[in-house]
């Protein structure tokens, strides 16, 4: 199964405009497809409710239930997804492929009970009927499996299968919702059943693919737990990123502009819509980053580290380092420029265009959109720089940058509630600018004396890992 890097290099090696367009189209599809299809999934649920005559309050509650489940499950799985991904990479590098699936099963053994109990405690406060409580629990647990399976599919770089899984989920959701509508009429329970069935199909497809790709040792289910201790900074990287991105949205739900859709369910429709369209302005960075790293940067990066591992001379290493860092500087500069141009066009053209379309986009939403475009621009560039820190195994530097972003976004978003409501998003914007500065600083400090940094991080004597997590990893 060819990975995206191999596929991209093959496509970009071909000459001609058509080949380049195909390469960028492929990159856009595999990189942004899952995110866009996830949003499309929520949108399709709302469209189905409108088409089938579901009352407005029930449609809003349906979107809230789905959104809460998505965000909650992302944050829960985000606490371990990056260390687990590192574990997968290490196992694949060591050619111990049979230990990959046990880690998938073991992570679910821990996450599913925690997620079930947390979701149950929340649902018991909502006052919903038994059927809706069960369906929400089912959806939340399904999403935990979906995000973990997606991490494994991403690790083996099978992005096409992720897209197929999303398409199957949306199709199944439409079909089941339509059948429920024909039998029960326009009920909230019928549409929630469609959502649950859709993600259920996605789970079946994804898990079958994983079990077909990987052998299963049927042992060492908790071996990955020791990676949580060894790479605890990766926990901070994953969790802080979600806190930074979502905190200002959640705070706006609970603020004066938010509305209570149902007990425990809140939303801020104007800000949520503006946030979604503003986030679309950073898709160019995601696509450009994959192209620049896989096609331009990675070959030089790989050659540099091969010289360390082989018999490279000091002269060869110094020469390759200079070339690699020049490529890194050039690619990050080009990427930043493209994102600034894209954000500028979104602000100058996008806000006017959105207000002219029949989307109910008000001038207030336009103000939110402009401010958030600036914030997402800074976040996107900072996130790419942080990913480059991870490329160089500067995990601690990436953790500092992301922790700064998460804490600053949370604190400043709370402080911004004292401002006029059109400026509520300024906290996120400032946090994103701070994130950009800190991530650049950590990358610069790490790479300014790279050979010393690489060699000094290696222990002189192999150390046996001890501690609670290490003991847990040996239990089962």
Image (cartoon, rainbow, N blue to C red):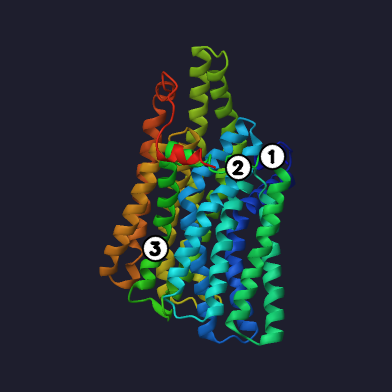
Q: Of label 2 and label 3, which has the lower sequence position?
A: 2
Res. 39 image quadrant: bottom right
> Marks 1 and 3: in contact by CB < 8 Å?
no
The quadrant of the image that shows the N terminus is top right
The quadrant of the image that shows the C terminus is top right
Label 2 packing within 10 angstroms: few (<14), some (14-19), many (20+): many
Q: Which residue is mark 2?
A: 291
Q: Which residue is mark 1?
A: 12
Q: Is residue 375 above or below residue 387?
A: below
Q: Secondary structure at mark 3?
A: helix
The count of marks equals 3
Q: Secondary structure at mark 1?
A: helix
Residue 160's spot in the image, x, y percent?
69, 51
Q: Of label 3 and label 1, which has the lower sequence position?
A: 1
The residue furthest front is: 475
Q: Which residue is mark 3?
A: 371
Residue 274's spot in the image, x, y percent?
46, 68
């Amino acid at each position: 199964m060819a990975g995206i890097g191999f596929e991209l290099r093959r496509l970009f090696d071909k000459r001609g405009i058509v080949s380049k367009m195909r390469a960028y189209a492929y990159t856009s599809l595999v990189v942004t497809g899952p995110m866009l299809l996830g949003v499309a999934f929520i949108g399709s649920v709302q469209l189905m409710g409108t088409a089938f005559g579901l009352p407005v309050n029930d449609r809003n509650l349906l979107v809230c239930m789905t959104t809460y489940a998505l965000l909650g499950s992302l944050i829960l799985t985000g606490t371990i997804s990056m260390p687990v991904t590192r574990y997968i990479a290490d196992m694949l590098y060591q050619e111990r492929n049979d230990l990959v699936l046990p880690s998938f099963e073991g992570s679910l053994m821990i996450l599913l009970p925690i997620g079930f109990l947390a979701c149950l405690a929340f649902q018991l406060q909502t006052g919903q009927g038994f059927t809706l409580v069960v369906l929400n629990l089912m959806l939340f647990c399904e999403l935990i499996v979906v995000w973990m399976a997606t991490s494994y599919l991403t690790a083996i770089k099978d992005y096409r299968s992720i897209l197929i899984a999303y398409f199957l989920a949306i199709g199944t959701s439409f079909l089941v919702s339509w059948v429920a509508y024909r039998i029960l009429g326009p009920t909230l329970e019928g549409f929630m059943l469609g959502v649950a069935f859709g993600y259920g199909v996605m789970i079946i497809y994804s898990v079958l693919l994983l079990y077909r790709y990987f052998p299963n040792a049927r042992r060492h289910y908790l071996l990955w737990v020791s990676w949580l201790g060894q790479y605890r900074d990766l926990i901070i990287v994953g969790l802080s990123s979600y806190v930074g991105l979502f905190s200002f949205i959640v705070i706006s739900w609970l603020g004066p502009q938010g509305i209570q859709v149902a007990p425990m369910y809140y939303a801020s429709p104007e800000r949520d819509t503006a946030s979604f369209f503003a986030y679309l302005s950073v898709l160019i960075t995601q696509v450009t980053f994959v192209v620049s790293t896989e096609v331009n940067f990675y070959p030089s990066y790989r050659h540099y580290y091969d010289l360390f591992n082989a018999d490279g001379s000091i002269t060869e290493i110094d020469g390759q380092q200079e070339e690699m860092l020049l490529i890194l500087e050039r690619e990050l500069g080009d990427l930043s420029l493209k994102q600034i141009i894209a954000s500028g066009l979104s602000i100058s053209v996008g806000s006017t265009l959105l207000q002219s379309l029949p989307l109910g986009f008000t001038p207030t939403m336009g103000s939110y959109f402009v401010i958030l475009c600036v914030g997402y621009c800074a976040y996107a560039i900072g996130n790419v720089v942080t990913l480059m820190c991870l490329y160089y195994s500067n995990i601690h530097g990436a953790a500092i940058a992301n922790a700064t972003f998460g804490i600053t976004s949370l604190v400043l978003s709370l402080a911004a509630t004292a401002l006029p409501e059109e400026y509520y998003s300024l906290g996120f914007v400032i946090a994103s600018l701070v994130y950009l500065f800190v991530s650049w600083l950590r990358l610069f400090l790490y790479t300014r004396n790279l050979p010393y940094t690489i060699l000094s991080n290696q222990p002189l004597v192999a150390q046996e890992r001890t501690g609670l997590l290490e003991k847990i990893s040996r239990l089962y």
